[in-house]
Structures are given as structure tokens and as C-alpha cells.
């Protein structure tokens, strides 16, 4: 009984925090207005060509499933073998029973369909999991933090180009997040440089380099940041560990993976 009361109190507190955040968001300028004040005008956002999403009525369930790291890895394998796959081809990161449940779920929400003795993605071709991951992280800001957010954002800028993967308004401040669905071994110095270029150009209050992996950031990603910072500053700022796989630069730029803390 006491545990149920604590859970109810926690849920009520979370709901009240969301309500207050939504109210605060409505009292501060819109995200687009904040961007315009910095000379940034959105001309493209949220492309749908490579999104792997079910129909609107299934979106809530799909969003909840994407919170599971093993499901996200499973979706990556489905995309990799999108023309045709068997259960065995997508059972690398979960047990056989869990994979069966994941396949049944995708069938029920009509993301995949039977194909001979296996399955295939209904929407094809899909280049990668990247856009779907950006959509998911953007939804986290919208749903969990009552924040105004957009993903796959493009600006027309004279010197700095590329997509801003996720941009959100948090309590009147701008957050920019770079989202990587690839493992660290597939990340290159040019991507670190591009992230820092966009960070310096936009000057958000918070910038985040997020990698959807449970591998250590200290082994490759942190040294790449340290190397790039040495190129830009005579006395580069340290890349300091906050805790576990969360690192910070200047107390406003953060590097993090998806491993539970």
C-alpha cells in the first residue's frame, strides 16, 4: 500500500512538473522567434522520406517501444535487411522470445509484412535508422519535458551548413542535439568538427552530442573532441567527466551515450 501511494505521488508530481513546464513554455517566446533573434530562419525541417513509423493510432505504443535499447538495435537490423529478413537475421541483440515479440509488434502496427518464409519492411527503401532516432529524441522533449522541439532542421547560413538533428526550447533557452545512430567506430573527425561549428554558430545555451550506443565514450569519442579542441584553441578547455559516460565542455556542451546511469 505504501509503495502504491509513493508511486501515485511520483506520478502526480511528474504530471505537475509537465504542466508547469508547458505553462512556462507558453509564457516565453516560441522556438522560431528565439532562433530568428539569433539570425536563424528555418527553411526545412522534419523530412519524412526515411522515417520508419506506424500509422498515427499506433505512434504512442511505438514511442514506448523505442525507449528499449534492444528494440532500437532490432529496428536497425530490420532496416539493414529491409527487402527480406528471417528471425535469425534480427536476433543478434535480444533473446529468441524477445525477438518474436518484437516481430509480432511490428506486424501488428503494420511496419513489416510477411514475405515468403520471412518478413520485409513495408515502407522501402529506407537509408538508415537516423531520421527515426531523431524523431524519437524530439518526441522525448515534447512528451516528457513539454518542450517545443523540432528535428532535421536546416538553416540557410553563409558558412555553416548541415542539419541540426534536434533543436528544443527548454525554459526559454535553446538546446541543440546532434544525434548519432552509428557506433563510435563509424564516427569521423569531420563529424566532431561539424558539431562544434554548428554549436559556435548557433550559440545555444546547451548543446549535446548524443550517441545511441552503450559503448564507452572515453575510448574514442572523447579523444576526438580533445583533438578537435586543440586545433581551435591555444589553451583548449578540458573534456571533463561528469559521471559515468556523461562528459562536459564549458559546462554547456555535453557528450553522452544511451547507457542507463
Image: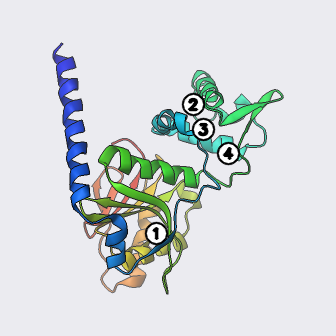
Across and down, in percent, residue 172 comes to 25, 63
Left or right of 141? Residue 10 is: left
- Colour logic: rainbow
Say which quarter of the image contains residue 226: bottom left
Find the distance from the CA under tag 2 to the CA under tag 4. 16 Å
Q: Which mark is residue 79?
A: 4
The answer, for residue 34, to whether it is visible in the render is yes
Q: Which mark is residue 224?
A: 1
Q: Residue at x 46, y 69 (%)?
A: 224
| Residue that numbered label 2 is attached to | 94
Find the distance from the CA under tag 1 to the CA under tag 3. 28 Å
| Residue that numbered label 3 is attached to | 74
Q: Earlier in the sequence, mark 1 or mark 2?
A: 2
Which SS class for mark 1?
A: helix
Find the distance from the CA under tag 4 to the CA under tag 3. 9 Å
Q: Residue at x 45, y 38 (%)?
A: 67
The one of 162 and 31 positioned closer to us in this rendering: 31
The one of 215 and 98 positioned closer to us in this rendering: 98
Circles 3 and 2: CB distance less than 8 Å?
Answer: yes
Mark in front: 3 vs 2: 3
Amino acid at each position: 500500500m505504501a509503495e502504491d501511494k509513493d508511486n501515485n505521488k511520483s506520478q502526480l508530481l511528474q504530471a505537475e512538473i509537465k504542466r508547469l513546464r508547458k505553462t512556462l513554455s507558453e509564457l516565453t517566446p516560441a522556438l522560431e522567434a528565439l532562433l530568428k533573434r539569433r539570425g536563424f530562419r528555418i527553411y526545412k525541417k522534419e523530412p519524412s522520406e526515411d522515417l520508419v513509423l506506424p500509422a498515427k493510432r499506433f505512434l504512442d505504443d511505438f514511442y514506448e517501444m523505442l525507449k528499449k535499447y534492444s528494440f532500437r538495435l532490432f529496428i536497425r537490423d530490420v532496416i539493414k535487411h529491409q527487402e527480406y529478413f528471417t528471425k535469425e537475421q534480427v536476433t543478434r541483440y535480444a533473446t529468441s522470445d524477445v525477438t518474436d515479440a518484437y516481430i509480432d509488434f511490428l506486424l501488428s502496427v503494420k511496419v513489416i509484412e510477411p514475405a515468403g518464409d520471412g518478413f520485409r519492411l513495408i515502407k522501402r527503401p529506407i537509408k538508415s535508422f537516423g531520421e527515426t532516432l531523431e524523431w524519437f529524441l524530439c518526441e522525448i522533449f515534447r512528451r516528457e519535458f513539454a518542450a517545443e522541439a523540432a528535428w532535421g532542421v536546416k538553416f540557410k547560413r553563409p558558412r555553416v551548413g548541415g542539419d541540426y538533428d534536434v533543436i528544443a526550447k527548454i525554459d526559454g533557452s535553446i538546446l541543440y542535439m546532434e544525434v548519432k545512430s552509428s557506433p563510435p567506430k563509424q564516427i569521423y573527425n569531420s563529424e566532431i568538427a561539424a558539431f562544434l561549428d554548428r554549436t559556435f554558430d548557433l550559440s545555444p545555451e546547451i548543446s549535446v552530442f548524443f550517441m545511441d550506443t552503450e559503448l564507452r565514450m572515453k575510448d574514442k569519442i572523447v579523444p576526438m573532441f580533445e583533438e578537435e579542441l586543440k586545433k581551435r584553441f591555444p589553451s583548449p578547455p578540458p573534456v571533463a567527466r561528469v559521471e559515468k559516460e556523461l562528459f562536459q565542455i564549458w559546462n554547456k556542451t555535453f557528450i553522452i551515450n544511451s547507457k542507463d546511469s
